[in-house]
Image: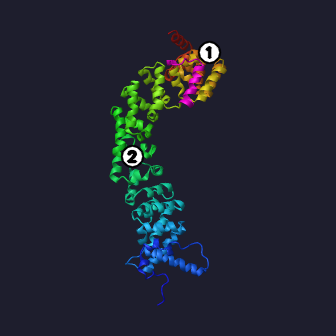
Amino acid sequence: MAANPFALPADPRLQSPSLYFTASTFTHFPFTKFSGFSLRQKSLNNRLLLSCRCGALAIDGNHSTSMFADSGIMLFSLLQEMGFNEKDTEAILRTNAALRYTPFESIRARIQFLQSAGVNGLALSRLIVKRPDVLTAQEIDALLYFIVNDCNLELQGKIVPSQIERLLNGTKPEFLVGFESKVRLLLQFGIPKDKLLHVLNTVNLTKALCLKSVEELERMLAFVNRFGGADLILRRPAILNYDLETHLIPRIGFLVELGGGDELATATVLRKFPFVLAYSVDHLKDHVEFLNSYVGLSYEEIFRIVLVYPSLFSASRKRKLHPRIDFLKQCGLTSHDIYRFLIKAPLFLSLSFEENLANKLVFLVKIGYENRTKELALAMGAVTRCSCKNLQEVIGVFLNYGLTCEDILDMSKKHPQVLQYNHESLEEKLDYLIEEMGREVGELLSFPAFLGYKLDGRIKHRYEEKRKILGEGMSINKLLSVSAARFSTKSRTKGPVSTIHDLKGSEDK
């Protein structure tokens, strides 16, 4: 019988896997450059090399040598077709025995599944280098089948490939079991089907689903359901990454305790600022104790501020909270004053000093506010709601209409909000006041709140209604400050004489 040119050499040393890595005859054989050999010789030598290398790695008493040699040749070639060089291919086969005993067709099918899931090219190569067991681990089959073939959820091609790569790269195969049931549990919890992909593409799939048992995930979702449920998860899917016992229960519990046990109010805080759950209990305590001990606020007052502006926990205590509170104290505000200030202007705690607050301080001082006064602090609170540019434009509008800096100062002390109104809207109201109502701009000094009412919804409508009855000389204060219900009643039931009498009587009072 003719000798089989692809059979393993008879020498037992050549049958040992160790020869695969030590014999210079094989490890340094050139794959890409040949000189002095025919194409036929090149092919025979390559096949002999692959047969010896892969056959030596795949030797098994239950299979014929030629069967493993052929399988090994195909696997070696497949890896090189995917872009692995000779050295990388050798390393992958050397360090992963499962590859040597897994049928080639099974490995090829797994690679096709990974590609169908969106992991291909360089991403697939990276994954195989870091986790070669993705080609052989049986636990991965159910995961890939769910991602690729589930007709109900239609996930194929929609989960970001990098998410799948991170999942397979960072998760031991045994923790991938039950992935489908955990995803379906999210749907049962209330995550809408059309929002499910947003969640899956945002969370750390290993932490959020794989490292939690179904029972643990159920307990977490039941707990979260008390504080916003699916809506809270959709606002910040990363909440699923947290551990129930060490993260969520202590952090939410701290807020509930601060709120006097009010879970509904705590749910409001979480809905407004779900990122608060990213902070440790020590971080939350540090901020609360600062407001309690240094500012003199009660825990009830602190929670009310948190309820209005939970983002205060994101402000650095040393860089922002401490300097801002010091400023308010220097302006003469008491603990109660600071509480009322923070309820109305909590943004003051978070805005950049260099890019925002410092510029606004300059504008306020220029129009006449004195440093370290309560009036300056209240004005600063008002202008936190507008940009520096808008504040500058507002002051410019007032000056262009003939008001002086003293007039602006006087108006803003009576009604600080005039400094935060949109400058374009302000200009429209001033035009209407002067041109349509025939009034002097100086009337604003006694009633600056005029500028806070909507032009179309209130000023124009009421002026047109009352002008038919009272003529041009009506009080803009009484015209606008009366409630909508009372204004509507008076307009329907009273004639000109009684309405004028009522207005004059109110003014006398």
Q: Position of residue 36 (x, y in %)?
A: 61, 79
Question: Is residue 432 something that shows in the picture?
Answer: no
Question: Is residue 455 something that shows in the picture?
Answer: yes
Tell me the crowding category of disc 1: few under 14, some 14 to 19, or many 20 or more residues within 10 angstroms, Cα based.
few
Instruction: Please tell me which residue is depicted at 37% across the width and 34% down the height of the picture.
Output: 285
Instruction: Please tell me which residue is depicted at 54% across the width and 62% down the height of the picture.
Output: 121
Number of residue marks: 2
As drawn, 433 above or below 26: above
As drawn, 457 above or below 86: above
Tell me the element at label 1. Answer: helix
Q: Position of residue 420 (x, y in %)?
A: 56, 26
As drawn, 89 above or below 404: below
Tell me the element at label 2. Answer: loop
Q: Position of residue 20 (x, y in %)?
A: 46, 73
Magenta residue span: 353-375
Which is nearer the N-term, disc 1 or disc 2?
2
Q: Farthest residue toward the top?
A: 508
Main secondary structure found in the magenta portion: helix
Q: Which mark is residue 442?
A: 1
Tell me the crowding category of disc 2: few under 14, some 14 to 19, or many 20 or more residues within 10 angstroms, Cα based.
some
Q: Which residue is mark 2?
A: 242
* Residue 63 falls within the magenta-colored stretch: no
**Which three-letter amino acid code belongs to the residue tagged 2?**
Tyr
Relative placement, left or right, of 123 versus 426 is left
Q: Position of residue 93 (x, y in %)?
A: 45, 68
Corner quadrant of residue 309: top left
